[in-house]
Image (cartoon, rainbow, N blue to C red):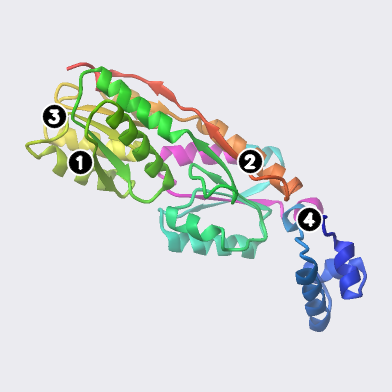
């Protein structure tokens, strides 16, 4: 049975208006507020604060917390979220975390202080593990990274299938020693690594994996050391556009010809991937749909806070170019 504000008022022995003022930090005494809060705990009432704010116009603001705004994937998703928010008369507070759990915690506190209506969030694995234990008074929709089943709504790519498709594509073009360079902080990279490993074993090949901070500089350094070794791989699968960029820079610095000496395949169909000769093979993510779906899910969660948690899984599209050409 759903517990409502009237149940709280009966338990506290006050009016529903007094309950509303107490929960909304209105003008009531400390003793009366404590009395109402005790009734809330006793009845198990869960106030839909975000919906109340949306209706009252008290806070028509949502938070958008992304891992790296320099990553064109998050730039494009942010644009889609902002477009949908603007169309609905909402403002957006944009925060960049650089995959830092401490910054994520700080921005979540900021969202509470700003009393936002809801938050769209791309968290690290560390913060994902903490989210379930942290009570928040606004709904959260995860993008790019999903939490444990049943915890938070999420909109993600089918990362395992997409990564396996890259391996299948590279194998079909005659490569056997295929390395995988993956980000070290997100569940997305972990899922893409799982897809790579499964596909390699399905082809009877041995996975060869490195993990790095998910940015171009770290990827360039790791790829340069890897590709300079005598037993270097003849192909690399990269887990995001920044890591792909770092691998291209490393290959060029070492004088390796793509695809003659090294085949490359990765994620994110950014404009530069078609300009680099001979063009880079990538999985194109439906970034606009990810942002729009996340906003839609947030609106649904605000309107019906007790509905079942949903995980929306979208498909990527293979864009094959010259970087994976036959030897």
Disc 2: which residue: 295
| Residue 76 within the magenta-colored segment of the rendering | yes
Q: CA distance from mark 2 to mark 4?
A: 18 Å
SS state under label 2: helix
Q: CA distance from mark 1 to mark 3?
A: 12 Å
Q: Residues within 10 Å of mark 1 (few under 14, many from 20)?
A: many
Is residue 44 visible in the rendered image? The answer is yes
Magenta part of the protein: which range? 53-81
**Where residue 104 appears, x then y in whole percent?**
48, 59
Q: Position of residue 275 (x, y in %)?
A: 31, 24
**Among numbered discs 2 and 1, the one appearing first in the sequence:** 1
The spot of residue 62 in percent (x, y) is 64, 51
Q: Which residue is mark 3?
A: 256
Determine whether the residue tagged by mark 4 lies in a helix, strand or loop.
helix
Q: Are marks 2 and 3 in contact (CB under 8 Å)?
A: no
Q: Which corner quadrant of the image does residue 108 belong to?
A: bottom right
Asked whether 144 or 174 is in front, the reply is 174
Tell me if mark 4 has few (under 14), some (14-19) or many (20+) residues whose alpha carbon lies within 10 angstroms of its own.
some
């Amino acid at each position: 049975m759903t517990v409502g504000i009237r149940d709280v008022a009966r338990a506290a022995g006050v009016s529903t208006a007094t309950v509303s003022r107490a929960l909304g930090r209105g003008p009531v005494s400390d003793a009366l507020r404590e009395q109402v809060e005790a009734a809330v705990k006793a009845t198990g009432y869960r106030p839909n604060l975000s919906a109340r704010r949306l209706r009252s116009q008290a806070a028509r603001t949502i938070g958008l917390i992304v891992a790296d705004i320099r990553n064109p994937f998050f730039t494009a998703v942010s644009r889609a979220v902002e477009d949908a928010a603007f169309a609905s008369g909402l403002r957006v507070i944009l925060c960049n975390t650089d995959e830092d759990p401490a910054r994520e915690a700080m921005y979540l506190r900021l969202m509470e202080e700003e009393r936002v209506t809801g938050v769209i969030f791309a968290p690290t694995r560390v913060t994902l593990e903490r989210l379930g234990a942290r009570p928040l008074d606004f709904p959260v929709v995860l993008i790019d990274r999903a939490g444990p089943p049943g915890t938070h709504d999420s909109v993600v790519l089918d990362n395992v299938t997409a990564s396996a498709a890259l391996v299948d594509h590279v194998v079909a073009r005659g490569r056997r020693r295929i390395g995988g360079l993956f980000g070290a902080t997100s569940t997305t990279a972990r899922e893409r690594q799982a897809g790579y490993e499964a596909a390699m074993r399905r082809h009877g090949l041995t996975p060869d994996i490195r993990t790095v901070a998910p940015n171009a500089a770290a990827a360039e350094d790791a790829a340069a050391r890897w590709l300079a070794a005598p037993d270097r791989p003849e192909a690399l699968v990269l887990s995001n556009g920044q890591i792909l960029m770092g691998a291209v820079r490393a290959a060029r610095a070492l004088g390796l010809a793509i695809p003659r000496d090294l085949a490359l395949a990765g994620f994110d169909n950014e404009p530069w991937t078609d300009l680099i000769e001979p063009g880079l093979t990538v999985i194109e993510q439906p970034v606009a749909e990810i942002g729009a779906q996340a906003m839609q899910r947030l609106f649904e969660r605000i309107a019906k806070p007790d509905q079942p948690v949903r995980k929306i899984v979208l498909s990527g599209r293979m864009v094959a170019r010259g970087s994976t050409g036959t030897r």
